[in-house]
Structures are given as C-alpha cells and as structure tokens.
Image (spheres, rainbow, N blue to C red):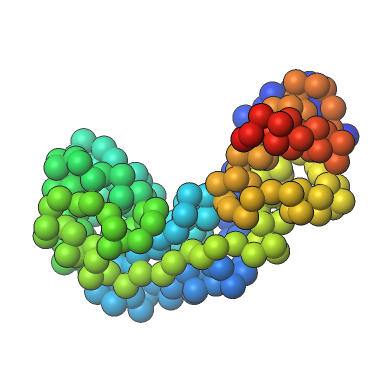
Amino acid sequence: MSVRQLVLDLPVRAALGREDFFVSPANAAALAAVESWQNWSGGKQLIYGPPGSGKTHLCHVWAEMTGAQVIAAGGLARREISDLITARVLAVEDIDRIAGSARDQAALFHLHNLLLAEGGRLLMTGTGAPAAWPLELADLKSRVQGTAAAVLGAPDDALLAALMMKLFADRQLTVQPNVLAYLLRRIDRSFADVHQLVDLLDRQALAEGRAVTRALAGKLLDNQHDQGT
C-alpha cells in the first residue's frame, strides 16, 4: 500500500504521453487522424467528443510528436497572435467554450487564417458535435465546420478499465484488478462518470486512511445509490 493512499494528499499529475494513451475502437480513428498530421486537408484537424474522452490527451500526444503549443480557446483575445503562430504548430482546445465571446472568436478566426497562410498546422478540439456549437462569428463557424473532424466515441469496457487505471495511477494509487472489475459492473458507462468516481474514491480513501478496496468502493457506491446520485 502506498504512502499516498494512507496520509498524503499529493497533487494529481496526469500522464499525457503516447504510451499512456490506450487505443480502442472508440478512439482509434481520432488517434490515426492526429498521427497523420502532415497530410491534414488544409493543414487543420478537429477532434471532438464527450467530456473526459481524451481530447486533451490527444493534444499532448500531438505536441509530443510535433513540438506544438497547447492552449485554451478561452482567453485567446488576451494572447499575442503573432507570438502564437511562430511555432507553426498549435493545438487550440475547447472551441465550443468561446460561444458568447466575440473577442475570443475573432482572435481564433485571425489565428486560423494567419497560421494556415504560413503553412502551419492547427489542431482544434471541442465537446459535442461541431455543428451544434453556437459560434456567432459566421466566418469562424464556416471554417470550423469546414474542417475535417474525427470523433472520440462512446467507451467500451476495455477503454473504461484502462481509463480508470490511468486516473488512479495519476493519483499514485494502486488498485487491484478485482476492484476494477467490480467497478465496471456498477458504474454508468461514460467518461465523465469514471472521472468523478475515481476522484470520489481518492478522496474517500484519503479521508479514511486506507487503500481503494472493493469494500471501500462498495460503500461509496451504496451511499450514492441511497442518496439517489
């Protein structure tokens, strides 16, 4: 049993390398799109999917391959666009979140045009289908929707198990296979629920000064059920 499990509340360090990215039918197409970055149509690619599905991880996999800078779309208006395009490879995350921000949308529009005019590469991500993103700037919306897109699909059991293992490892927690199998039988089948459950188990284990066991997991899940959550 690790010291982390018993007494220390250490910061979570997410492993975002290629070797930490578990490939399954749900994400294979998106990974292939990222790995073929030199052949992107128009020099750009869009990755979208539900929260927690691995969009940020894929951005960092690409950054590891290319030396790209990874930035958030929110707050782009406060950045110097000329500085951002110097590297010629850039990943901009959470495009959907700048709906309602005219300044950030304008900044992304200009960044998109200048970077691609220089022969650069642009990776963009967002949650949900791009056609549903309520971007108000028509020119930006047309460019986003005209970008080749790859979706991160709904997870299968193998991907959910791998995600749980990674999230526990990010928290320096060791969890036995029988605990993972038990959790897979009882959790909702979504990335967001897995992220939330691992966080709750981490907090509960720390509060009780014990390992993440099947008994602890059962207690937490039973309490959630009794509370209707």
Residue 68 at what x, y percent from top left? 39, 56
Asked if residue 23 is positioned above or below residue 63 in the image, the reply reads below
Q: How far across and how far down the image is residue 56, in percent? A: 47, 51
Q: Is residue 154 visible?
A: yes
Q: Is residue 63 visible?
A: no
Left/right placement of residue 66 relative to residue 40 reads right
Is residue 179 shown above or below 27?
Answer: above
Q: Nearer the viewer, residue 165 or 81?
A: 165
Determine whether, in the image, residue 45 is placed left or right of residue 205: left
Location of the N terminus (image quadrant)? top right
Q: Residue at x 18, y 48 (%)?
A: 105
> Where's residue 116, x and y in %?
21, 65
Residue displayed at 11% across by 60% down: 139
Q: Which quadrant would residue 142 be assigned to in this image?
A: bottom left
* As drawn, 229 above or below 24: above
- Quarter-of-image position of residue 41: bottom left
Horizontal side, residue 29 vs residue 80: left or right = right
Quick one: 45 or 97, which is closer to the camera? Answer: 97
Residue depicted at 49% across the width and 64% down the height: 152
- Please provide percent x and percent y for residue 124: 34, 58
**What residue lies at 44% left-to-right and 59% top-to-bottom?**
49
Using the image as rendered, state which of residue 170 and residue 191 is in the foreground.
191
Tell me which corner region of the image, top left, top right, bottom left or bottom right, holds residue 158: bottom right
Q: How many marks?
A: 0
Q: Quadrant of the C terminus?
A: top right
